[in-house]
Amino acid sequence: MMLSQLGIGEVATIVAIEGGRGLRQRLHLRGLFEGKVLRVISSCGPVTVEVDRNVVAIGRGMAHKIMVAR
């Protein structure tokens, strides 16, 4: 399932990122990489998630390339 498909308040673990090196690097700098647990805060407009007590907002295109498991 993709990150963009999760609802508000749902918790999931990142299992894969389907993108190139640039996308992976941008997400890694924000604390988003395989094995991280995140919680969706908002999905209206950009997808806002909480990772390690940090709030990160990413675009829908990026969220669509992040595969997660509940």
Image: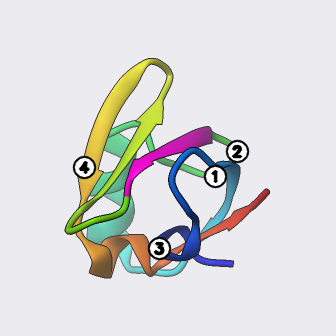
Would residue 16 appear left or right of 56 to someone viewing this image?
A: right
- According to the image, label 3 marks what residue? 4
Q: Nearer the viewer, residue 41 or 3?
A: 41
Q: Quadrant of residue 68?
A: bottom right
Instruction: Say if 13 sits above or below 52 in the image.
Output: below
Look at mark 2 in the image and give the residue it sits on.
Answer: 35
Q: Which residues are magenta?
A: 37-42
Cα gap from disc 3 to disc 1, whole angstroms: 16 Å
Q: Residue at x 48, y 32 (%)?
A: 51
68 relative to 7 in the view: left or right: right
Above or below residue 65? Residue 28 is above
Which residue lies at the image location 55% right of the left edge and 62% below the top edge?
Answer: 7
Which circle marks residue 34 in the picture?
A: 1
Q: CA distance from mark 2 to mark 1?
A: 4 Å
Residues at marks 2 and 1 touching, judged by CB atoms closer than 8 Å: yes
Residue drawn 26% across and 68% down?
Answer: 22
CA gap, disc 4 and disc 1: 17 Å
Binning the other alpha carbons within 10 Å of mark 1 as few (below 14), some (14 to 19) or many (20 upward) gives some
**Helix, strand or loop under label 3:** helix
Residue assigned mark 4: 57
User: Is residue 55 located in the magenta-colored stretch of the structure?
Assistant: no
Look at the numbered disc 4 and give the secondary structure of its residue: strand
In the image, residue 36 sits, relative to residue 47, either above or below, namely above
Which quadrant is home to the C terminus?
bottom right
Q: Quadrant of the N terminus?
A: bottom right
Q: Is residue 27 left or right of residue 3?
A: left
Check disc 2 and give the amino acid type.
Gly
Disc 1 marks a residue whose amino acid type is Glu
Q: Distance of mark 3 from mark 4, alpha carbons?
A: 12 Å
The image quarter containing residue 41 is: top left
Which callout, 3 or 1, points at the residue further toward the start of the chain? Answer: 3
Badge 2 density bin: few <14, some 14–19, many ≥20, Cα 10 Å: few
